[in-house]
Amino acid sequence: MTAATTRSCTSIVLGNATIPSSLDESSLSTVCRVALWTDAQPPQDGTNLDIYVKADEFATVWNSPMHLSSFSTFSHVQIHVQGNFTPDIASTLQTSLLLAGLVATGERKATDTVTVQAQKRAPDVRMQAKPLWTTTTTPPVLDENSLLESDLLAPPPALSAVATKGDDCGGREPCADCTCGRKDGNVLLEQQPQAVPASSCGKCGLGDAFRCASCPYLGKPAFKAGEEHLVLDLQDDL
């Protein structure tokens, strides 16, 4: 048998398959005979591939269903099975064609040979469709300031303008719904401690034993001079 590794074969004869009368193995360099299917080396170029195999040797010589995918340059493949074409052979060939990206287009039956014809799958038309729109143009850049109203972009009024605008209600009582803060200021003024009564005897800070009956500090603890207001402000937090 002639090794297929040194020849560019477009017709491969597997095992003891019969060479068709139209082919002369000794004179045509494109015909190669190999013992096993994996011994066949894919050529660099070619569009049509013919494979010849005997049915009773198929299970042995067709030893790799994936090997057909190595012949990626061929767009049309014909596999000639000589002898009894069984369902097992058909299933194995279908798997090989599927893995190689080929689809069976038909079968041709002769006296003692069944030829399975296959070709490359047609490209998906949907994948070649043009896009509905293109993005070649650059979208316009929006100015964020243009999205705001003009009065929102105006600078805040000066403090002097706010102070001189309208009545500041400085000469009258605060309004019932006062929002300027004058009413809160008056409340704080009212809560300030009243004037501390002066001691006439000078002994109020010594305690109740030295205080008279009308002493304003009666019942209060003793204190040092100058701490009278602290004593008067004593309150229970509870």
Image: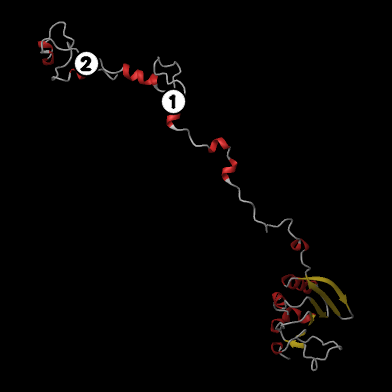
- 14 or 5, which is in the foreground? 5
* Residue 127 image point, x, y percent: 74, 62
- 95 or 139, which is in the foreground? 139
* Residue 76 image point, x, y percent: 80, 76
| Tag 1–tag 2 contact (CB < 8 Å) | no
Judged by depth in the image, the label closer to the viewer, 1 or 2, is 1
Instruction: Identify the image quadrant of the N terminus.
Output: bottom right
Q: Residues within 10 Å of mark 2 (few under 14, many from 20)?
A: some
Tell me which corner region of the image, top left, top right, bottom left or bottom right, holds residue 131.
bottom right
| Up-down relation of residue 198 to residue 150 (above or below) | above
Which callout, 1 or 2, points at the residue further toward the start of the chain? 1
| Up-down relation of residue 96 to residue 156 (above or below) | below
Tell me which corner region of the image, top left, top right, bottom left or bottom right, holds residue 232.
top left
Q: Amino acid at mark 1?
A: Thr
Q: Which residue is mark 1?
A: 164
* Residue 168 image point, x, y percent: 42, 21
- 3 or 35, which is in the foreground? 3
Q: Residue at x 72, y 56 (%)?
A: 133
Q: CA distance from mark 1 to mark 2?
A: 43 Å
In this rendering, position of residue 116 left or right of residue 236: right
Q: Residue at x 39, y 19 (%)?
A: 170
* Residue 120 image point, x, y percent: 77, 72
Instruction: Identify the image quadrant of the C terminus.
Output: top left
In this rendering, position of residue 52 left or right of residue 153: right
Q: Residues within 10 Å of mark 1 (few under 14, many from 20)?
A: few
Tell me which corner region of the image, top left, top right, bottom left or bottom right, holds residue 83.
bottom right
Q: Which residue is mark 2?
A: 232
Q: Amino acid at mark 2?
A: Leu
| Up-down relation of residue 69 to residue 182 (above or below) | below
In this rendering, position of residue 209 left or right of residue 45: left
- 76 or 17, which is in the foreground? 76
